[in-house]
Image (cartoon, rainbow, N blue to C red):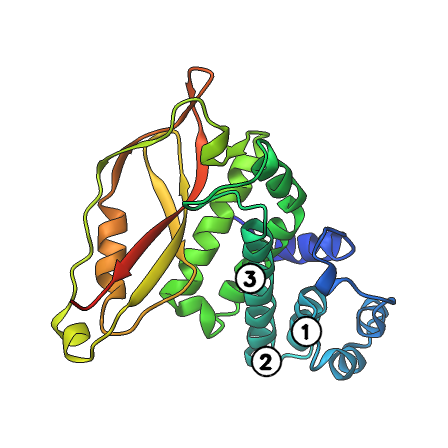
């Protein structure tokens, strides 16, 4: 990550007041805890912000704990903030009308509109994750956390360059898989009769590389094989008006017992 600690702090504060159509998280009134933090009452802020489910307040809770020298508690609050922000972002992307998957029904341009609306919360999530990583939080050491950060950072990089991220329905020529391996069904999964579907949210870049994150997981030792298969994917990028473009879509792996 290329955020320094002071920059992260500034970005979190700068983005704290943003509004975006994530109405479930919108505060009905000003936050007492954030007000206390801004006044330098960090202990009071902690007491007021404990138990909050608002991702902005949770980031402030983490910053307040850090000010009090409680790095472990700070990391936990920042982890909670990041996870909550990640799911809010992906839920907005996945809402109807759908912009990716087998049954796309969104009007053209919907993906661009949603992603532009989500630019600030994506930046907030990336900054929060960087702060959590700097504090060596519990989640920041996990592969799933790192994959979530990588995908959001990839989205943010494209958006900050002023480029468009398309849904498959928006492109002139769809991306073409030239190598798409199938994950191996493990002996452990077979013994335990594991079946189900894993969905990966994937950013297909114009240079032929992709970034992905699982939106759900499955037991039976199947996830490493899913990651290996995704890492080995080769594709020809999608085209829009004769130019290769970035596409956001999903990959699904279904495991069934016959």
Residue at figure coordinates x 70%, y 74% from the top left = 64
Q: In this view, does 161 lie to the left or right of 168?
A: right
Q: Could you tell me residue 179's position as x and y percent?
A: 20, 38
Classed neighbour count for the residue bearing mark 3: other residues with Cα under 10 Å, few (<14), some (14–19), many (≥20): few
Residue sitting nearer the eye, 22 or 173: 173
Q: Is 227 placed above or below 140 here?
A: above
Foreground: disc 1 or disc 2: 1
Residue sitting nearer the eye, 130 or 149: 149
As measured in the structure, the alpha-carbon distance from the residue carrying label 3 to the one carrying label 1 is 13 Å
Q: Could you tell me residue 253's position as x and y percent?
A: 29, 56
Secondary element type, mark 2: helix
Query: Nearer the N terminus, badge 1 or badge 2?
Result: 1
Q: Could you tell me residue 120's position as x and y percent?
A: 66, 47
Q: How many marks?
A: 3
**Residue position marked by numbered label 2 in the rendering:** 73
Classed neighbour count for the residue bearing mark 2: other residues with Cα under 10 Å, few (<14), some (14–19), many (≥20): some
**Residue position marked by numbered label 3 in the rendering:** 87
Residue sitting nearer the eye, 66 or 214: 214
**Residue position marked by numbered label 1 in the rendering:** 53
Q: Is 119 placed above or below 16 here?
A: above
**Where's the C terminus, which quadrant?**
bottom left
Residue at figure coordinates x 80%, y 65% from the top left = 27
Residue at figure coordinates x 48%, y 42% from the top left = 104
Q: Residue furthest top?
A: 242
């Amino acid at each position: 990550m290329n955020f320094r600690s002071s920059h992260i702090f500034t970005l979190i504060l700068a983005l704290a007041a943003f509004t975006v159509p994530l109405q479930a998280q919108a505060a009905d009134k000003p936050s007492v805890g954030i007000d206390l933090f801004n006044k330098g009452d960090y202990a009071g802020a902690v007491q007021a912000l404990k138990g909050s489910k608002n991702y902005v307040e949770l980031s402030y809770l983490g910053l307040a704990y850090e000010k009090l020298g409680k790095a472990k508690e700070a990391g936990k609050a920042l982890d909670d903030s990041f996870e909550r922000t990640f799911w809010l972002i992906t839920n907005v992307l996945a809402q109807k009308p759908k912009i990716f998957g087998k049954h796309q029904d969104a009007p053209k341009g919907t993906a661009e509109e949603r992603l532009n609306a989500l630019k600030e919360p994506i930046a907030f999530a990336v900054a929060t994750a960087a702060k959590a990583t700097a504090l060596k939080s519990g989640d920041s050491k996990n592969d799933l956390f790192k994959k979530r950060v990588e995908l959001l950072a990839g989205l943010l990089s494209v958006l900050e360059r002023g480029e468009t991220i398309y849904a498959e329905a928006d492109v002139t020529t769809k991306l073409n898989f030239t190598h798409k391996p199938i994950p191996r069904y493990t002996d452990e999964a077979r013994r335990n009769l594991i079946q189900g579907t894993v969905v990966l949210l994937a950013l297909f870049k114009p240079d032929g590389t992709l970034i992905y994150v699982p939106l759900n997981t499955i037991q039976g030792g199947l996830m490493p094989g899913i990651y290996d298969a995704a890492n080995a994917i080769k594709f020809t990028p999608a085209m829009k008006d004769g130019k290769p473009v970035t596409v956001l879509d999903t990959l699904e792996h279904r495991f069934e017992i016959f």
